[in-house]
Image (spheres, rainbow, N blue to C red):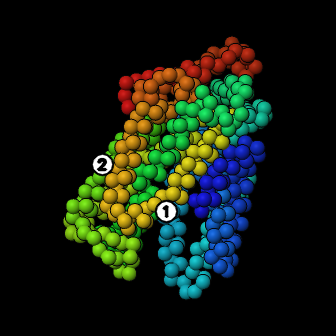
Amino acid sequence: MSAGSFIGALAAGFLSDHVGRRWALFTACCIWIVGSVIQLSSQNVAQLVVGRVINGLCVGIMSSQVPVYLAELSPAHIRGRIVGIQQWAIEWGILIMYMISYGCTFIPGPGSFRTAWGVQAVPALVLLGALIFFPESPRWLASKDRWDDCLATLAHLHANGDTEDPAVQAEYLEVREAQKISSESSELPVVGLFGPRMWRATTAGVAAQLWQQLLGGNVMMYYIVYVFNMAGLTGNVNLYSSAIQYVIFLVTTGITLCFIEKIGRRPLFVYGAILMCALNFTVAGLMGNYGHGIEGLNGDATIRWQVGGPPATGVIACSYIFVGIYGFTWAPAAWIYCAEVFPLKWRAKGVGLCTATNWIFNFALAYFVPPAFSNIVWKTYIIFGVFCFCAFVHSFVGFPETGGKTLEEIDFLFNSGVPAWKTKNKSSGFNQRVHQIVEKQGAGIRPADDPAKMDISAGAVHTENRT
C-alpha cells in the first residue's frame, strides 16, 4: 500500500489543480471502493496485492489533498485545529480497524479476512455521499478566476452567506492579491517548488514529513509487537498492551488540537524531537545493558533479544511515553505544517510532494525495521535517536512559525529573511485589514471594488526572540 500511496500522492496535486479539491477527494473515494472490492473477492495473493496497490493510490490522494482542502477552507485562527482533525481521524480509524480485525479472528474460514477487507469500504461510501454537500475550496475557485463563486463560498463558510462581512471582504481581497502575484510568476508549477522563492518552503514541508517518519513514531506504532515480545509479553497481554498505546496516541493528539493555536507549530517540532531523542536513547540503554541475545521466541525466529524484570517495564513505559509525545507533537504538526507553507499556485503539488516523501520513507522503513530488530536489535533505537536530534536541529533553524497567520501571509514569511527561531506565533495582520475594511464601508466604499492593493505582508514577519 505504501508504494501505491507514493504514486497517488505525486499524482494528487495535478488531479486536484485540474478538477478541484472536492472532486479529487470524490475520485479517491471511488478508487478506494474499487480496491476494497478487489481485496474482498481475492482468490490469490496476486489479486490481494493489486487491491492493496489500488487502495494505496486513494490513500496517497487523500493524505495529501485533505490537508490542502481543510487548510483552504479554514480561517487562520483555527486552521491548525481543523487540519489536525485529519490526523486525529486517522488515529480513530487505526484503533477501530485494530479492534475489528481482532474481532474477525473469531470468524472461521475465509470469511475472517473477507469481512475485514470489506468493512473498510464503508467509510468511503459515507464520505462519497457527504462530499456532495461540501463546498469547493474558495482558493481553488480563485485560481480558476471564479471570483463570484470564491466570494460566495467565503461568505458561506465564515459569515452565514453575508458577502459584505468585513472579515469575508478582507480574506477575499487577500486571496485576490495573492492570486495576482502568483499569476505573474513565469515558473512552471513543479519547477517552481525548487525556485528561489520557494525552496525554503519546499524544504521545510518535505523535511517535516521526512522527519515524522524517521523519528521512530511509526516504528513504535506498527512494530510495537516486536518491542513487547522482546520485553517478554506474548499472547493477549501483547494484544491489550498494543491497544493501550493506540488509545494513548488518540488521546494525546486530541488534547493537542485543543491548544495548538495557542502553542504554535515550532514548539511542537523542537521540544517533541528532543524529548523523543532522549526516549530512544533511554530504550537503547535499557535493552543494551539489561538484555541478552536469544535464538527466537515462541517459534518467532526474528526475535533475537530479550529483556526482563524492571528494565522490561522501563522499556514498555518509555514506549508508551514516546507514543504520547509523538501524538502530542510531530504526528499532527507535520500534516498541519506542510499544508500551510505553500502558496496557492504550488500548494496542491507541494503537499503532494511532502506526502509522497512520507510514504516512500514509510515504505523503506517497512523493509528496514524488521531486519534491524533481528540483526542490530537495541542499536536500532540509537539510529532513531540520532534522527530525532537531527530533526531537533533542523526544525529549530529551518521551520518558521506559521501559527495564527493567514495562508497568504505565510508565503511572505518564508521570503522575509527573518531567522526561523525569531518568528512569532499569532502576529497576523488580518485584524488590522478587517478594521480597514470597516472604515472603507463606513465611507461608502465597497472594498471588493476598491483597486487599492492589500498589504498582505503586514504582520507576517513580526519577530520575537523565542522558540
Q: CA distance from mark 1 to mark 2?
A: 25 Å
Q: Residue at x 46, y 33 (%)?
A: 398
Query: Quick one: which residue is furthest to the front in this view?
Result: 375
> Where residue 309 sits in the image (x, y, percent)?
21, 69
The kind of secondary structure element at disc 2 is helix
Local crowd size for mark 1, using a 10 Å CA cut-off: few (<14), some (14–19), many (≥20)? few
On the question of residue 440 being in view, the answer is: yes
Give the number of the disc on residue 278: 2
Nearest the viewer among 447 and 289 is 289
Nearest the viewer among 313 and 200 is 200
Q: Is residue 17 left or right of residue 111?
A: right
Q: Is residue 439 left or right of residue 17?
A: left
Q: Which residue is mark 1?
A: 367
Q: Quadrant of residue 375?
A: bottom left
Query: Amino acid type of disc 2?
Result: Ala
Nearest the viewer among 407 and 15 is 15
The kind of secondary structure element at disc 1 is helix
Q: Residue at x 41, y 50 (%)?
A: 215
Query: Quick one: which residue is furthest to the bottom in this view?
Result: 108
> Where residue 193 sits in the image (x, y, percent)?
63, 35
